[in-house]
Every structure is written in C-alpha cells, then in structure tokens.
Amino acid sequence: MNNWKRICVLTEIPQLGSRVVKSTEHGDIAIFRTATDEVFALHDQCPHKQGPLSQGIVHGKQVTCPLHSWKIELESGNAVAPDIGCTKPFTVKLEGGDVFLALT
C-alpha cells in the first residue's frame, strides 16, 4: 500500500531540474522534472561514488551525475552501460498539477 505525500506544485521544480525531499526513513530523495513535464524520483546518490544526482544534468529520461558523468535512467535508477549499478527509484505521480511521492 502506498502512502502518498504531496511534495509541491510541478512548476516549483525547474524543467530539466530537481528538488530534494528529506526523509528520515529513506534519506534524500531527488524529484526530477523532464523537458516534457514528466516526474521521476530517485535516491539522491549515484551508485558510483554517491554523488548528488539532484545536482546533475537532466536530459531526456536520464540524469548525468555531477561527479564522474555517470548517466542514470530516471525510470529505473539503473546506470547506463558501460557503467553498472543502480540507485533506488521511488514512485511519483502528477495529479492536478501537484507532485506526489509514494512512501511505502
């Protein structure tokens, strides 16, 4: 069962940017907004050296880590080959212009 938490209005997240949500249970969670207003959420740590993905560059449905340029898929949290690893994805939804995060 999902416990939906309202995070913000979509326009409070810059296009091709992110917003960080602090969670005592899950750590920092980065909420990303693409150029087409899709939203995704990942644990805010690159699987390589734990770089802050929220400070990375969003392009398409990927984010590039600011530390060593690893590309991470926003939908799955998986690193793009040839890199290997993943960061935890979280379920988000957009409803009536509001962004909700599922914390289970």
Image (tube, rainbow, N blue to C red):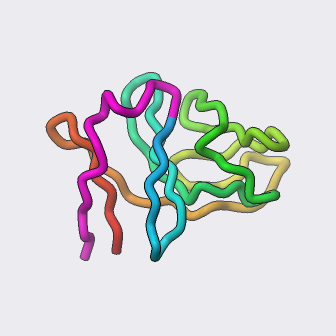
Q: How many marks?
A: 0
Span shown in magenta: 1-17
Which residue occupies 32% across, 63% down? 102
Q: In the rendered structure, does residue 79 fall within the stretch colored magenta?
A: no
> Does 11 lie within the magenta span?
yes
Position in image of residue 4 (x %, y %): 24, 62
| 76 is higher (above) or lower (below) than 67 | below
Residue drawn where x is 73% and y is 60% of the image: 47
Q: Residue at x 30, y 50 (%)?
A: 7
Q: Nearer the viewer, residue 63 or 54?
A: 54
Q: Horizontal and vertical percent for residue 80?
A: 73, 46
Q: Is residue 67 above or below residue 77?
A: above
Residue 103 in the image: state x and y as whole percent.
Answer: 35, 68
* Residue 62 spot, x, y in % from top left: 60, 38
Near-viewer residue (81 or 30):
30
Which quarter of the figure has residue 71?
A: top right
In the displayed structure, does residue 86 sit left or right of residue 27?
Answer: right
Depicted 27 relative to depicted 52: above or below: below
Where's the C terminus, which quadrant?
Answer: bottom left
Of all residues, the one furthest to the left in this rendering is 96
* Residue found 38% across the figure and 35% down from its top: 38
On the picture, is 49 further left or further right than 58?
right
Res 98 quadrant in image:
top left
Q: Quadrant of residue 46?
A: bottom right
Location of the N terminus by quadrant is bottom left
